[in-house]
Amino acid sequence: MSPLLLLFLAGFFAGAMNSLAGGGSFVTLPALIAAGVPSVNANASSTVALWPGGAAGAWTYHEGLRPVGGVSMPAMLAVTLGGGLFGSLLLLWTPSSTFDVILPWLLLLATLALAFARPLAAALHGKVQGRAGPALLVQTALGIYGGYFGGAVGLMMVAAWSLLGENDIKALNGPRTLLVSIANTAAVIAFIVAGAVRWPQTLAMLAGGLIGGAAGARLGRVLPPPLTRHLTLAWTASITAVFFARAYLF
């Protein structure tokens, strides 16, 4: 089987995962690294490959946008965009040898967010209501993380917004999807301008991701949510363990 076909299949499964429970980068990033792409370029290419699906999702929620925790959406957009741009530049300035050591910890953080962000959001609900300054500071940090790596950043946003008194998770889907897409958009532009994207591999994954996203949306109608969540966490934990072994044992 050709490498590009394997990357297409990886994109397909990543798109399906993102539609079902998130965590698609836990497929695309390892696949690109296994294909011989250096880790920084692999992360940049993975972001570009998954961006169209996220952008399409953001558009579907465009009519549901509203302030978050009393902070206006234009302000949230501005700090997320700036953070995403800074995070993407920070990635480009990171040598692949250094990123190889950092990457397992980023994967672990994303796995923990997938596992515990929603319960944490419920526990932290309303702790800093009405405080725009801390909200914008935290959103800037999340934008930086989104531009640099971005795994499970949407769940992290929901957990952070719960501090502001937000508890309607469904109503937060629009702002969350848009702001994640904004951080990724800044990163995509920076990665393309910097020439960090490996285009043949990226385009193969992008095509697979679009098809997989549609298939995952259909599959999500019949699969029990607890099953998809448990399968996703099992996959992300396994990939995290592999990358820790790769960075520190071999």
Image (spheres, rainbow, N blue to C red):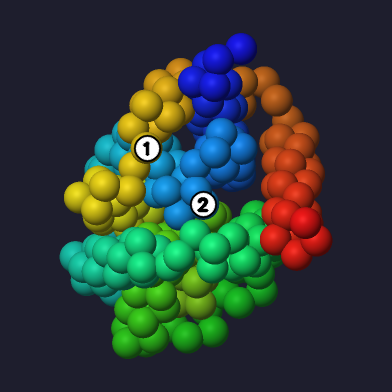
Q: Position of residue 238 (x, y in %)?
A: 78, 47
The image quadrant of residue 74 is: bottom left
- Inter-mark Cα distance, 2 to 1: 11 Å
Which residue is drawn at the image coordinates 54% and 21% (left, top)?
3
Tell me the kind of residue under disc 2: Ser
The image quadrant of residue 24 is: top right
Reply above or below: 188 against 219.
below
Q: Position of residue 116 (x, y in %)?
A: 69, 62
Q: Earlier in the sequence, mark 2 or mark 1?
A: 2
Q: Is residue 99 left or right of residue 147?
A: right
The foreground one among 24 and 215 is: 24
Circle 1 residue: 198
Which residue is drawn at the image coordinates 36% and 82% (left, top)?
137
Instruction: Decide if residue 153 is in sight here.
Output: no
Which residue is drawn at the image coordinates 34% and 32% (left, top)?
199
Disc sitting over residue 39 in the figure? 2
